[in-house]
Amino acid sequence: MTTLRLLTGCALVVTLGCEGTIAGPRPEVIAPPSAGGDPQPSEPTPPPRVEGRLALQPIRRLSIAQYENTLRALFPGQLGVDLVARARYPGASTRTGLAAGFSSDADTNSVGTSDEATLEDNAEALADFLLANARTAMPALMPCGLPAAFTDAQVDACIDGFITRFGGRAFRRPVRAAEQAAIRRAYDTVRLSQGATEAWATVMQYFLQAPALLYRAEAGAGATGLVALTPHELATRLSFLITDAPPDAELLALAEAGALSDAALEAQAQRLLARPEASAVVSRFVREWLRIDLLDAVPDNDPALPAALRDDYRAQADHLVRRSFSATSGSVRELFRVTRFPLGPQSDDVYGQPSTGGATFPDVAVPERQGILASGPFLSAHAPSGHQVAILRGAFLRKQVLCLSLPPLPGNIDLTAPLDAARSAPTARDRLAPTMTLPACSGCHLSLNPLGYALENFDAAGRHRTTENGATIDASGTLDLDGTARWSFSGPREFFETVAASPELTSCAARQFFHFAHGRQSAPEEQPFVDDLGAATTTSGGTVQQLVLGIIRSPRFTRFLREAAP
């Protein structure tokens, strides 16, 4: 569809140009909400408090999951299923190493030249499919009661209403006058030489690659000063936070009526948390926080982790999270304390259990394991190229699970000779012993290695073991956590319980969820709010409801400071 590409390529400029700019820093003291945002009568009015400035909120492109959920919301039934199956949307690829972040982060979903071409190709391919199936697709989508045997004249009469109605759902806000005119021009241009069906397909290709659909840009309602998100922006932010999908009919109706008060916003959050989509979002949060998504990067022919076992592990991780830490039950602490694991047909042997005889993933008690850190999916995801490396596992636990700083790497250190001398030692602890004793190394490794040693009873595929190369594995350890606590554990079970009970875990979960919710790392000036969220998370044990409500109850969820008009 070369004609479609040329037309929509020009029209995209109009759409993008209308998106406005995003917030600047927020004031040190954020006042309580005014009209429409008063606390519920049963709650005392809190005094103004220092929450810190809010960093720049970036424009965020939809992740793959969010884009596919958008297609399902826009196109009913089988039509949405077929479009998702054909979509080739460029989203965040699996990250490597210790990189922090989530698949819906703004910087993770930046668009390069090749991605730009892919977005155009994707929209063209989906528009081609809609054109080929126009006789069933158009009556299902057009708002004018279009009959199955429709005529060009009937489509012409309905197209403006379609642009307004479909465009409002696609853009998650009312279509602006300039956008309406640009889309209608694209339709009229094609109609000069082709039928209404082809012109309608042009409109669909326009929508499917429009920045207003692909991006979440928040312009706010106001020129300068403390600016509130528009009701549609607020509805969009809430819905994508909880369901990874655009607002549904009930939430949109409240936005269109201007009825999203603080109380209504919280009520809608509670309603959305009860939907099945919310548990899928919680599962994504955990998979990406703990980097279980690294399994996606394992080649199908990897001998240490065959494709069937890897696929089993991916499903197992989803079952484990949903059963112990869903949107409506469980907590972070429970997830790190679970002793029953959902075993699939490929992983029962890994866990030393008899065959389950099917792919139903029944929960089975496994005595030597506790919590998600002892699960096959986590352990194998953190064994690059089929090798468990105590230092890497320890560094990950310290940085991503406990949110403790990593010691800086000193320069000009040559460990070749000391490590070569210990290379033939039977266990990882013995082979890495020089890093714990040499003065140039011990400053870092005393805070990393013990965390990794605690997992040495599990090999690269997640199997439990007590020996390595015939020698007994010593998984005990002692370490200081940045001067805040001293941990001592005799083995993995005691270590897992120490992690689960620690305030460092729940505080880190809050920090990671802030990042997940806002699509960016917290800024230094936001630390007071992150600290408060962490303290509340420690008190609750880290329930999803507490994390979500903690995010949306802050004025930073509903407003920002604009220092100059866009």
Image (tube, helix red, strand yellow):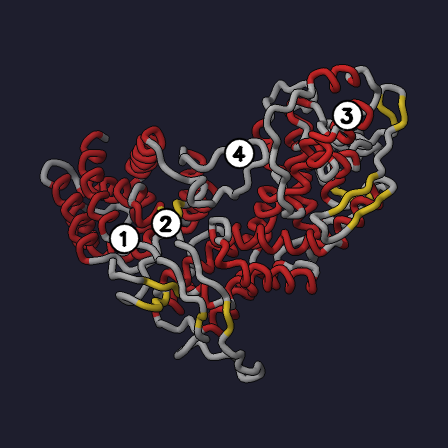
* Circle nearer the viewer, 4 or 3: 3
Q: Earlier in the sequence, mark 2 or mark 3?
A: 2
Q: Amino acid at mark 3?
A: Pro
Q: Position of residue 295 (x, y in %)?
A: 61, 31
Q: Which residue is mark 2?
A: 59
Which image quadrant for residue 278? bottom right
- Can you tell which mark lies on residue 255? none
How many C-alpha atoms fall within 10 Å of the one at disc 3: few (<14), some, or many (≥20)?
some
Q: Earlier in the sequence, mark 1 or mark 2?
A: 1
- The CA span between labels 1 and 2 is 10 Å
- The CA span between labels 3 and 1 is 57 Å
Label 1 close to label 2 by CB (< 8 Å)? yes
- Can you tell which mark lies on residue 95? 4
Q: Amino acid at mark 2?
A: Ile
- The CA span between labels 2 and 4 is 21 Å
Which image quadrant for residue 116? top left
- The CA span between labels 4 and 1 is 29 Å
Q: Amino acid at mark 1?
A: Glu
* Circle nearer the viewer, 3 or 1: 3
Q: Which residue is mark 1?
A: 19
Q: Residue at x 50, y 42 (%)?
A: 103
**Which image quarter is the C terminus in?**
bottom left
**What is the secondary structure assignment of the residue under circle 2?**
loop
Q: Residue at x 18, y 40 (%)?
A: 10
Left or right: residue 25 versus residue 433 is left
For residue 258, above or below residue 73: below
Label 2 close to label 3 by CB (< 8 Å)? no
